[in-house]
Image: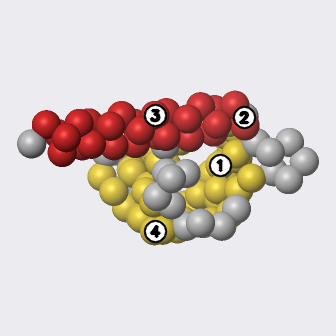
């Protein structure tokens, strides 16, 4: 799971993206305002802040650097571009694989015991 967090004036916004399940979710001040399944290299989320201002997240992978980039737009103006390197993405994938392996071994162990 990768997460991009940003304080946009009085609002705390967060994009969470699972590189395993493809689920992406956007939160404004802890309240989910957008979600979708995405397995492509880019996606967009359109949402509104609590005061009605329109915003957009663009999530993409830079083909040159392989960095995961989250662009934050407010009223169609780019506010910031947040980046996470390939190492963060790989670490997240390895953690997920480790959890799946441990869970599988635990289930197998329970089946053998019973």
> How far is the residue under mark 3 from the one under mark 2?
20 Å
Q: Residue 38 in the image: x percent, y percent?
A: 55, 67
Q: Is residue 53 visible?
A: no
Q: Residue 41 in the image: x percent, y percent?
A: 70, 62
Q: Tell which of 113 and 45 is nearer to you.
A: 113
State which quadrant residue 29 falls in.
top left
Q: Specify the label residue 36 is tagged with.
A: 4
Q: Tell which of 27 and 114 is nearer to you.
A: 114
Disc 3 designates what residue?
98
State which quadrant residue 114 falls in.
top left
- Residue positioned 18% across, 45% down in the render: 111
Disc 2 designates what residue?
85
Is 82 on the left or on the right of 1, as rendered? right
Residue 30 vertical placement versus 92 (above, below) = below
Disc 1 designates what residue?
70
Is 105 on the left or on the right of 84, as rendered? left
């Amino acid at each position: 799971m990768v997460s991009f967090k940003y304080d946009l004036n009085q609002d705390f916004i967060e994009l969470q993206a699972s590189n395993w399940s493809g689920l992406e979710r956007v939160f404004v001040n802890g309240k989910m305002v957008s979600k979708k399944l995405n397995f492509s290299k880019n996606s967009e989320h359109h949402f509104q802040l609590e005061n009605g201002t329109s915003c957009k997240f663009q999530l993409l992978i830079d083909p040159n650097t392989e960095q995961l980039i989250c662009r934050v737009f407010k009223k169609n103006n780019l506010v910031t571009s947040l980046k996470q390197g390939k190492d963060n993405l790989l670490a997240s994938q390895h953690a997920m694989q480790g959890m799946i392996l441990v869970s599988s071994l635990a289930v197998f162990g329970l089946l053998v015991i019973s």
